[in-house]
Image (spheres, rainbow, N blue to C red):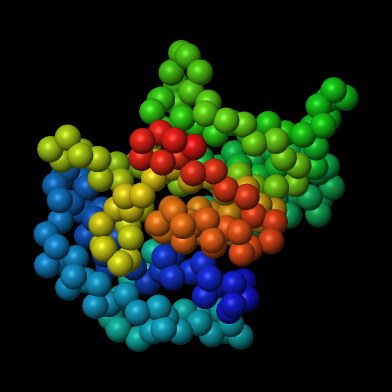
Amino acid sequence: FSKEWYCKAGEETNIALGPVIEVWSKYRDKAELPPMNLLEEKAQYTDIDKVIIDEENNTVFLEDENMRIDVGSVAKGYATELVAREIEEAGLKSAIISAGGNVRTIGKPLEKDRKKWGVGIQDPDSLIFDTGSNILDVAFVNDAAVVTSGDYQRYFVVEDKIYHHIIDPKTLMPGDYYRAVTIVTEDSGVADFLSTSVYLLPFEESLALVESLDGVEALWVMKDGEI
């Protein structure tokens, strides 16, 4: 990640948002909305510039004892990428890793009549175990990651409104622009990071971000179901 790249994509994905995420997690367990004054209080402790990384000693220091780190927007994709690279280096030529919303492919399928892996993109309105088709579209890729962020798996309902787990650092509320966003790019960590960033931006800004990055494709499912 270059500084320039992070400035383009990273504002929406703040790993220092932990205190706010922690509040949402506690209230999600009770199926209640957290009070905004509590969220605003915790938001005072989310300055990412106060996260001090010492690369030489492999340490992270938080300047304020009230701070918390939450890497849910990137950790799974990053870990998936590390696994993929390690098993490639060990000699595996063809594989597909599914890490729950994060798919990483290695090489191409071994079947002679298949040139690419087909990764299904779930319809947000269908359950994963529906007897009918729950696939909205298929991404055909080799040596690439397909990562989706959406409102349809981790959520709770209050007064018939869905509140999911992807929190917008500007509003301190769940992002409300889309049902889902899928990112396709080479690196699973980058794809995971971007799926959150793109999900939390209005469409014109979201589209501009994707178009500014080489080797990145995206699929948006809008609130009304439009793709």
**Left or right, 41 with reference to 170:** left
**Left or right, 180 with reference to 29:** right
Q: Quadrant of residue 138?
A: top right
Q: Residue furthest top?
A: 131
> Of 29 and 108, which appears nearest the observer?
108
Residue 165 locus on image (x, y percent): 33, 50
Q: Residue at x 39, y 45 (%)?
A: 178
> Of 21 and 193, which appears nearest the observer?
193
Residue 45 locus on image (x, y percent): 27, 77
> Of 68 and 37, which appears nearest the observer?
37
Q: Residue 196, can we see it?
A: no
Residue 156 locus on image (x, y percent): 24, 40
Q: Residue at x 52, y 29 (%)?
A: 136
> Of 49 and 139, which appears nearest the observer?
139
- The N terminus sits in image quarter: bottom right
Vertical side of 53 occupied by 148: above or below: above
Q: How many marks?
A: 0
**Left or right, 223 with reference to 80:** left
**Left or right, 8 with reference to 156:** right
Q: Residue 177, can we see it?
A: yes
Q: Residue furthest front?
A: 204
Vertical side of 80 occupied by 39: above or below: below
Vertical side of 216 occupied by 115: above or below: above
Q: Residue at x 30, y 67 (%)?
A: 170
Q: Quadrant of residue 168?
A: bottom left
Q: Residue at x 54, y 85 (%)?
A: 54
Residue 66 locus on image (x, y percent): 25, 77
